[in-house]
Image (cartoon, helix red, strand yellow):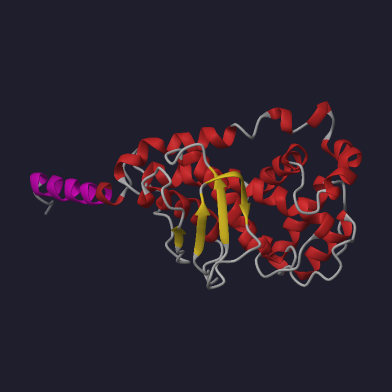
Amino acid sequence: MKPFPILNSFFVLLFLGSCLLQMPLIGADNNPPPPKIPKLDIRLTHKGFKTDPESFLAVCNSAAMAVARYYPKRQFKPILIPKANNGFPVKLDKRGPKGEPQIMLSIDDGWGWAQIAYQFSHEFTHILINHDQPRAGPNHWINEAFCEAVSYQALKQMAKDWASHPPYPNWKGYAKHHNSYADRYLGKDRARPEGMAFTAWFQKNENALRLGKRYPKYDLYKYPAYQFYQIIKEDPKQLEALAFLNFGLRNSGISTRQYLARWKTVLPARHKPFADKIGAVFGYSLPN
């Protein structure tokens, strides 16, 4: 005996309805919320700076977590910001009263979220690379270029995070500004500096890059930073490899190629192809 037609139709509709409930809505935002591990403690110790401290620190935390999410097991000391309107952004060699790393920013005003994020993510990456590690000497420009490239990646990541899970609901509309701020540094003119292929440009400018042992010229290292970003954006998880750049470095005076080759030797196997790609930017084939 066949089922009663109306009852049969009811169960079909019920089944279809349950399937629809399990399907994501078209256009729904499926971005996962930003991770909360590792926990960061960032403190604005600058007194009298015209900003809302809570909002300022929310931006810094978001920028740092765009990078720190790839270091979930790392224990970070509190990070102090003793001055927000310095002449230039810098991670200080001098530490806080309890050994805390210190970052000074160069902010036009206390409400330029994208500018704050750009500078803080750059200097935070110096903590990942340089804090408690040997100095890179004439190869420090590579550290700077990575920090710059990471700041672009951080802004792009923040644009995604804030589009779905901003620190405050009314900040959601600001997400696109992080994206456009990063694009200011990613123009096609950086792909071919002085109209030259990058490897040719590097051969011309390598000595000048290496002369900036502590403060490399931004007008020079921004070009390798552009190249690094093109690799990082394809697999941001490789940012974990940056902590090994100066790990165990004994002779900072080695050549650029030697510096990158040494880095590859101390990397976990999963990151060695990343080092090969970075080496290829300069026309190097790094030894296995």
Give residue 225's position: percent from left, percent from top.
Answer: 71, 44
Is 139 left, or right, of 66 in this rendering?
right
Give residue 77's position: percent from left, percent from top.
Answer: 52, 69
- Taking 58 as reference, is 40 above or below it? below
Residue situated in front as seen by the camera: 90 or 209: 90
* Quarter of the rendering containing residue 126: bottom right
Q: Give the main secondary structure, helix, strand or loop, of the magenta stretch.
A: helix
Give residue 84's position: percent from left, percent from top.
Answer: 51, 48
Q: What count of labels does the image hold?
A: 0
- Taking 236 as reference, is 195 above or below it? above
Residue 223 within the magenta-colored segment of the rendering: no
Is 192 left, or right, of 173 in this rendering?
right
Residue at 59 percent of width and 46 percent of height: 151
Residue situated in front as seen by the camera: 176 or 103: 103
- Provide the residue span drawn in magenta: 5-19
Residue situated in front as seen by the camera: 10 or 222: 222
Q: Extreme front residue here?
A: 48
Q: Is residue 260 visible?
A: no
Residue situated in front as seen by the camera: 119 or 16: 119
Q: Please state, as top left, top right, bottom left or bottom right, where the C terminus lies in the image.
A: bottom right
Residue at 87 percent of width and 40 percent of height: 205
- Taking 161 as reference, is 26 above or below it? above
Q: Is residue 281 visible?
A: yes
Is 252 left, or right, of 75 in this rendering?
right
Residue at 75 percent of width and 49 percent of height: 215
